[in-house]
Image (cartoon, rainbow, N blue to C red):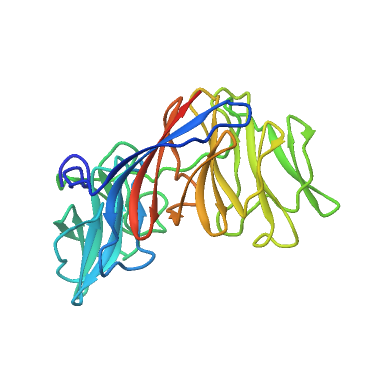
């Protein structure tokens, strides 16, 4: 596949858009650049789309004439010999894509279109990325938390046994819990360093969960919340340093810039998706690909994400200017 999935693709369109999105007080403007990743291929299996960990590539299943294949960045791979059961899955470094194909009673791991080997007892949904920065995939028994009876599949075909990594709880940058949520008379509040904020009807989304985020320097804090009779019909806001932002049908995926000066999040309004940076709205799209982790800051004043509009996928890069 090369060093990056789809890096050799022909870019279908490249649009540079200077958006006249100035805050009322003239704080910032957003400059948006869209790079087309092509339109969805015919035969796309709905719901099979996955995004690479670096939020720069998208892979999905395609079925044509009864045969399955994996497409990456709009570029189709070769047809697979067997029944596609697991994947696509990106490696942690986004340099490889793998899937699981069943042939008879055996399942085979395919990495970048090349067969690795058959694994005895491998489950169809037991293919996950390897450790961060390593182009590898774990296969075996999904409920095996210690890594016993599982394998790491390297891009070069080697194997090594290892233990599964575990996530850490959300805390402040110093590792100590600084906030908690509390219900008071049927309303929810967030207490930061012991001080209660405003009351809300809810802080959690039944599908996307919640957002409680500290800035990298630990001096700022943001969270999402909603008001209304029901979460699906309420209005969402993102609260940054105790100040509410604009109301949206949904607001989520809050992230601070590396220098802690800017905050961005996803919002949905009238079934259209957009990114909001410091209260300034970006362009609208039909959909993003993730509830959380869809926005990646590349530096203090730039971020990127993947989105699609009218069946066309875009890598969207946003610059923040003052």
Relative placement, left or right, of 67 versus 275 is: left
Residue with the most extreme front position: 20
Count how many numbered circles sit on residues in the image: 0
Does residue 315 appear anywhere in the picture?
Answer: yes
Choose between 216 and 311: the one closer to the eye: 311
Could you tell me residue 148's position as x and y percent?
34, 52
Whether residue 139 is visible: no
- Residue 70 percent coordinates (x, y): 23, 60
Question: Residue 86's quadrant in the figure?
Answer: bottom left
From the viewer's side, name the closer residue of 176 and 193. 193
The residue at the point 42 percent across, 53 percent down is 289
322 sits left or right of 17 in the view: right
**Relative side of 174 to 10, left or right:** right
In front: 239, or 37? 37
Farthest-out residue, right: 185
Figure quadrant of residue 14: top left
Across and down, in percent, residue 81 comes to: 14, 69
Quadrant position of residue 299: top left
Judge whether 219 appears above or below 72 on screen: above
> Foreground residue, 161 or 108?
108
The residue positioned 39% from the left and 64% from the top of the image is 47
Residue found at x 26% / y 70%: 43
Where residue 191 appears, as percent x and y from the top left, is 75, 37
């Amino acid at each position: 596949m090369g060093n990056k999935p789809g890096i050799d693709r022909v870019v279908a369109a490249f649009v540079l858009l200077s958006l006249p999105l100035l805050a009322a007080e003239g704080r910032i403007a957003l400059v948006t650049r869209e790079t087309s990743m092509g339109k969805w291929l015919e035969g796309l299996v709905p719901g099979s789309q996955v995004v690479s960990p670096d939020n720069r590539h998208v892979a999905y299943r395609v079925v044509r004439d009864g045969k399955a294949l994996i497409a990456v960045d709009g570029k189709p791979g070769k047809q697979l010999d067997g029944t596609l059961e697991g994947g696509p899955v990106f490696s942690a470094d986004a340099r490889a894509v793998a899937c699981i194909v069943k042939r008879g009673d055996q399942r085979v791991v395919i990495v970048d279109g090349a067969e690795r080997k058959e694994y005895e007892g491998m489950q169809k949904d037991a293919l996950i990325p390897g450790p961060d920065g390593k182009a590898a995939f774990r296969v075996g028994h999904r409920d095996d938390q210690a890594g016993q009876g599982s394998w790491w599949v390297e891009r070069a075909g080697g194997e090594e046994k290892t233990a599964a990594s575990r996530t850490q709880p959300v805390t402040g940058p110093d590792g100590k819990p600084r906030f908690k949520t509390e219900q008071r008379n049927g309303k929810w509040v967030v207490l930061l360093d012991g001080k209660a904020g405003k009351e809300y009807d809810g802080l959690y989304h039944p599908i996307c969960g919640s957002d409680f985020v500290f800035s990298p320097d630990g001096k700022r804090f943001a969270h999402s919340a909603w008001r209304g009779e029901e979460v699906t019909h309420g209005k969402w806001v993102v609260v940054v340093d105790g100040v509410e932002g604009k109301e949206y049908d949904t607001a989520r995926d809050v992230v601070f810039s590396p220098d802690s000066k800017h905050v961005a999040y996803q919002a949905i309004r009238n079934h259209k998706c957009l990114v909001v940076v410091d209260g300034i709205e970006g362009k609208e799209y039909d959909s993003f690909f993730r509830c959380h982790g869809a926005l990646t800051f590349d530096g203090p004043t730039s971020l990127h994400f993947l989105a699609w509009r009218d069946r066309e996928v875009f890598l969207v890069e946003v610059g923040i200017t003052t």
